Image (tube, helix red, strand yellow):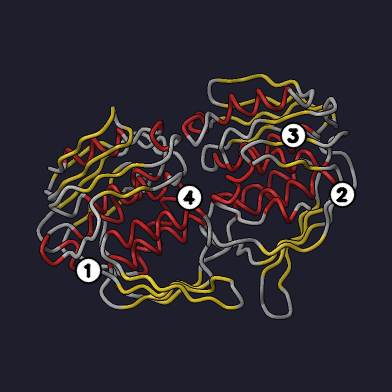
Amino acid sequence: MNVHITPHKFTGSVRIPASKSHTIRQLLIASLADGESEIKEPLDSLDARSCIDACKAFGAEINEVYDNKKLVSLRIIGNSNFTKSPSASAVNSFKIDVGNSGTTLYLALAVAALQSQPIEFTGDESIQKRSAAPLLDALAGLGIQVQSNKGCAPITIKGTWKSGRVSLPCPTSQYLSAILIAAPLAPAGTLTEIDVPLLNERPYIEMTLSYLKAHGIAYEASPDYSYFKIPGGASWKSFSSFVPADFSSAAFPAAAAAITGGPVTLLGLDPNDTQGDKYFFEILKEMGCEVKWQVSANDEHIVTVSRNGTLRGGTFDLNKTPDLLPAAAVTAAFAQGDTSLVNVAHARIKETDRIAVMLKELSKLGVSCTELPDGLIIHGKGFVSAPEKTVIEGHGDHRIVMAFAVAALGANFPIEITTAECADVTYPGFLNLLA
């Protein structure tokens, strides 16, 4: 699907959708727990739906609760027997299609390793190009049988989990989160030790560890997270919890405020949450925006973003927050001077090579960029100059589509964007929000 975005000022209040990262973690944990859990205000997106399908394949019963056609909660009866015996597992599918959801793929691969029957994973064209090789190598070192297409889907996993010490370099933190979620459920007496020579996206590990702590699951970790030790024989508990709003999604309406001036008020975000992408608001402040946090009359955090002066460039380390690169890059296109987005080579292994793609598509808007091995320098002029009938390729990447939809608001002509439907992967309704 192609969309046309007409330049206009973007203002108003926006309720930010639930966090994809929290939703998927809670879905998997609830599906492995004993008893019934409730996930309140979850993300209802294509990626979340992929995880729901995977959890059902693992034998969980998931009931959706709606209010006026809006999904308000998921009630999940977990399949704690999944890790105990093949006959009791109630696994009703041995082939799981994760669609476009890399988070679901990586986390579910480790969960599948707890099961002694083979489970095959596949996904869309993008997923079949995204390597899970470091995670698969680590699982193999723990006694798990692994078959793959050179580290990519289709991937078949067959347990059982054994004690071992493995090395797990993490260009994406999801490899480590996967083992942290699954390893506690390995058989009693099992000890999983992990050396982590490389770790990007550290805040997502802190998010995963917050769930282990909340459920009383024992683990040891070095202060720099280069080593973990997790004993088996533990269990996840049933729970009832709200899903925090998503700072990754919030970056796009916040960028719209920066580009067009705003003000835009964002509702539902918790500045105390573990999500690293709250860093985007620090970036906007350094670039010349006003960012004002308040607490509403009903004790809800709200943040308002606006700009009266000129956006200015800067240097920003995105190692912990690679998903911010598209939104930061289009914002930088409207700034005066150079903006360097650095230490983010792992942005190349997302749905697309986002460094190369942003350079290619920004050039269509008359924006000069310099590509770095680990980042991008945007040589901003304070405006973009797109020729009439400019077509931006969305590359089937939701964050690329949303970033250029925001950029189009400040362009000199309407802009057409391809593969726009993929915005629903994490932010359903975003394009309608932009009108």
- Give the residue pinned by disc 1: 80
- Of labels 1 and 2, earlier in sequence is 2
Q: How dense is the environment of label 3, judged by Cα within 10 Å: few (below 14), some, or many (20 and up)?
A: many
Amino acid at circle 2: Lys
Mark 2, secondary structure of its residue: loop
Amino acid at circle 3: Ala
Q: CA distance from mark 2 to mark 3?
A: 18 Å
Instruction: Name the mark nearer the viewer: 4 or 3.
Output: 3
Which residue appears at 76% of the width and 38% of the height? 407
Above or below, 411 relative to 250: above
Question: CB under 8 Å between callouts 1 and 2?
Answer: no
Q: Nearer the viewer, residue 100 or 338?
A: 100
Residue situated furthest front in the rendering: 1
- Of labels 4 and 3, earlier in sequence is 4
- Of labels 4 and 2, earlier in sequence is 2
Q: CA distance from mark 1 to mark 4?
A: 28 Å
- Give the residue pinned by disc 4: 203
Residue 228 position within the rendered picture, expressed as x and y whole percent measured from the top left: 27, 48
- Give the residue pinned by disc 2: 9
Mark 4, secondary structure of its residue: helix
- Of labels 1 and 4, earlier in sequence is 1
Q: CA distance from mark 1 to mark 2?
A: 51 Å
